[in-house]
Image (spheres, rainbow, N blue to C red):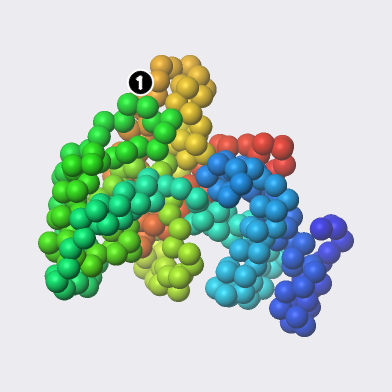
Amino acid sequence: MSQSVTWDDLKVEFVESVIGELWLEEVARAVRTVAPKYPPSSYTETGEWSTREYENLVQDVVVKQLLEAGQLAYIVDTASDVSSARALVHHIVRRTLARGRQRTVIDNLLERCRQLQIADARSGVARVDLDASGLRAVASMVAKLPRVRIINSDRAPVVYSAETLQEVLSLVREVVGSDVGDRDMARIFELALTDYLPSGLVHSDGGEDEPDRRLTPEDEVAAIDALRQLVALPADSQRLLALKISNRSDVYVAESFGISRPTAAKRFREASNAVHAVIVDASVQIQDEVLTRFSEHLLQRYIPSVDGLGDE
């Protein structure tokens, strides 16, 4: 986008056609600046940041966020100049990436649960719709079940053995019913495995629940306070978390700090526990928002763009 484009140009285009060539170029520019900071193995279908992947991301941002979620109207109402508008577009690109991650720990668990349900189909138990407190109660029981020790965290953690995962599924079925779906299981895992955040549980809700994710003014204050505490964590802890979020290997992380892999793993657990301590008493909605913002902060500050482009 030429630097000669003015804020008035963008506002006029919005009024006349909502989104046109100028706004599309702004989104494309933001995508090519922000996306290379994210590992393509986790955030693309092809495993590389190709022209096609950039175009797909531009389309997701434009259609799902700027238009369907009304974010472009928000930008026009909120921004005061080109720079502040671009900052908001960059933020939206990062949120789109964070919510569209290709494979996560929870994805793996859900797939294994589906396989177990196919192998052990049950019927006749009515499904029970649980509210937030009910889901928390089930998740607290799931959180007490034993987990597989992480030996090589270069790979996504297994979390539960086959026997324990069957126990998880049986426990949830007893409360929710045999017709438990991915949505309930995903929320239960998110609540039970918060200590795996923020490195592995960035999830995609497909934008379906976006209106319900908006925080109330009181929740926004709580989220800002929690985020302030997280960004005040020691710089080394934040850098370590950023490397794990961006899928750097254990060897890479250890060498970056000049320490052994077991020491790096220990420090990662300590950093994750520090994050958990800050958000543990917050609502699920606030936790999701804080972790999304904190992950964006970590990637922007500690992971340089692979092509050397800066993020405004």
Identify residue for label 1: 262
Judging from the image, what secondary structure is the residue with disc 1 in? helix
Question: Who is closer to the viewer here, 185 or 135?
Answer: 185
Q: Give the residue at the far bottom of this rendering.
A: 16
Name the side, left or right, on which 83 lies relative to 40: right
Name the side, left or right, on which 209 lies relative to 297: left
Dividing the image into 4 quarters, which one contains the N terminus? bottom right
At x 52%, y 39%, the residue is: 246
At x 55%, y 41%, the residue is: 41
At x 43%, y 51%, the residue is: 202
Question: Measured from the top left, where is residue 159 in percent x and y?
Answer: 29, 40
Picture quadrant of residue 22? bottom right
User: Looking at the picture, which amino acid does disc 1 mark?
Assistant: Pro
Q: How many labels does the image show?
A: 1
Name the side, left or right, on which 37 lies relative to 177: right
Badge 1, how many Cα within 10 Å: few under 14, some, many 20+? Answer: few
Question: Measured from the top left, where is residue 294 in percent x and y?
Answer: 46, 48
Question: Who is closer to the viewer here, 181 or 253?
Answer: 181
In the displayed structure, would residue 184 be above or below residue 252? below
At x 29%, y 47%, the residue is: 193
